[in-house]
Image: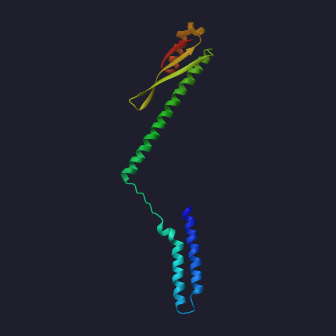
Amino acid sequence: MDGLRYWAFGICSAAIACGLARMILPQSGMQKIFQITSSVFFLSCLLSPLAFMPIEIELETPEQLMQEAESRAERITAQAQEQQGALAVESVRLQAGEILEGMGIGEYQIYINTHEKDGESIVISECEVYLDESYAPRHDEIREALMQQLGVNVLIGYG
């Protein structure tokens, strides 16, 4: 902001100086040369910020561009895998809830355990279900129904 203020002050000072010099200069052949000179001076004051403005050009090499693109692609792939895993976990959780509700079980907690396979894909290893103790006599029936529908190992806890 100070630079703009100094620039405006410089233009005003140049205009005043040129005007005063024209009034003082007598009418002669030198007046035409002085008008051209003062016009050039005033124009140079007007354009001085452009002449002293720093020019910054940042060029990136093709290797840097490729590295940045690969980095972005890896981040996007990781985010997609994470979202896909979360979606799969939620899908299994909802499906287990529907099975339990279909069997007349109202209160339950479901936890889905996952792990990475080969560092690339997420595998659902087991489903943990916590039920009220009143459902303990139906343990085998509930476990079998969940394992058959979900296709994963099911652990049932009571409490």
Q: Position of residue 62 (x, y in %)?
A: 37, 53
Residue at 40% x, 45% y: name it. 70
Q: Residue furthest bottom?
A: 28
Foreground residue among 54 and 105: 54
Q: Is residue 109 above or below residue 47?
A: above
Q: Is residue 29 above or below residue 68?
A: below
Q: Which picture quadrant has residue 16?
A: bottom right
Q: Residue furthest top?
A: 137
Foreground residue among 147 and 81: 81
Quadrant location, the C terminus: top right
**What colouring style does the render use?**
rainbow
Residue at 44% x, 44% y: name it. 72
Residue at 42% x, 43% y: name it. 71
Quadrant location, the N terminus: bottom right
On screen, residue 75 versus residue 142, left or right, reads left
Q: Is residue 13 above or below residue 122?
A: below
Q: Is residue 123 above or below residue 78?
A: above
On screen, residue 71 versus residue 35, left or right, reads left
Q: Position of residue 9 (x, y in %)?
A: 58, 70
Q: Position of residue 127 (x, y in %)?
A: 50, 20
Q: Position of residue 150 (x, y in %)?
A: 51, 21
Residue at 57% x, 79% y: name it. 17
